[in-house]
Amino acid sequence: MSKIFVDACFGKETPYTPVWMMRQAGRYLPEYMEVRAKAGNFLNLCHDPKKACEVTLQPVDIVGVDAAILFSDILVIPDEMGMELSFVKGEGPKFSDPIRNEADLERLIGGEEAASKLTYVYDTIKLIKEQLAEDKALIGFTGAPWTLATYMIEGEGTKTYNICKKMMYSNPELLHKILAKVTEVVKLYMEKQIQSGIDVVQIFDSWAAAIEPSKYDEFSWKYMVEIAEYLKEKYPHIPVIMFPKGIPAFLDKVYGNFDVFGVDWSTPMAYAKEKLGDRYVLQGNMEPCRLYSKESTTECVEALQKIMGGKRHIFNLGHGILPDVPVENAKHFINECHRVSGK
């Protein structure tokens, strides 16, 4: 695996600051679209280890990042817990049977039984490790329990989270039961990813900003910390990255045993450094739309390098890449990161 990338996650001195691109980094590539077309649909691609391996390696081979991120989807977890997942073109993921009450929750399987059903993910990891260059790391990932729960409760993506929030304020006991059940599956799922060969764990809380700051620890962060501390106790050599999106108001309350804090594009890196730089390695945080302009990309990369000084930092986007970004602009981002860090 990439010793440079893993050392950087632990805050150790490295010859240069490594760079990788946020989850979905390969989904804008023409080569990805060709493989997806052969798979028939998105879920088929997730369930096919050979094809999932191929698209995992594409951004590494084509764009030149320092780490690969496992191709999968966060929603394979509730899918294997017994929910019926589909991806509707133009609308995104949908569950036909959302969780709204105790009876709905009881019908879901949990723990080892659910985690053991995700064999296609573990098989994908093993294939990737056989083919990934030794100087590249492999990052596994999961959605945070809160982010997973929003889809499970709402039944689809949402801009208001009103069903989840109604449960949060009117029936918090039920929401905590859902979050606890998901957390137990995620712990075992990530452990099995580690056992299959991943080098780094990342926990995404894409919908963190949907929770008011005074409730964030109770309904999201504490569950993320529980997962991270479970993994760090058993696998201290595996770096853990936490990425909650859109919570600058929460930075002074961050705690837990993990290694890297992902800074999203809406949070100033200087502010994140002030609040967290002494305790965690920071990752991020370029605004993904800067990739439309090479000049804007260079400006941001140089500014990040100046702020961080090349230490305790991993170059990355501040969230997912957009599908119409030119491939040459993505390559430019990687090249500029390597240039300013001295690779």
Image (tube, rainbow, N blue to C red):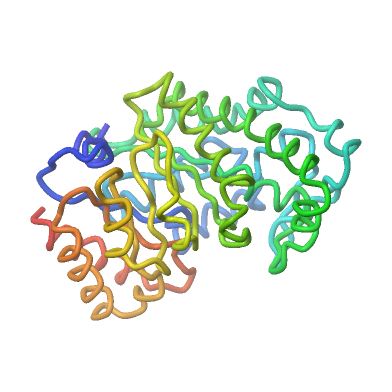
Task: Give residue 229's position: percent from left, percent from top.
Answer: 46, 29
Identify the image quadrant of residue 268: bottom left
311 lies above or below 225: below
Closer to the camera in the image, 49 or 84: 84
Closer to the camera in the image, 15 or 229: 229
Task: Identify the residue at image location x=69%, y=27%.
Answer: 114
Q: How many marks?
A: 0
Whether residue 136 is visible, yes or no, is yes
Closer to the camera in the image, 175 or 23: 175
Task: Give residue 331's position: percent from left, percent from top.
Answer: 27, 64
Task: Identify the residue at image location x=68%, y=33%.
Answer: 180
Task: Identify the residue at image location x=46%, y=26%.
Answer: 231
Task: Give residue 25's position: percent from left, percent from top.
Answer: 42, 57
Image side of residue 318 versus residue 167, left or right: left
Work out which quarter of the rendered image holds the N terminus and state it: top left
Task: Identify the residue at image location x=72%, y=62%.
Answer: 161
24 lies above or below 279: below
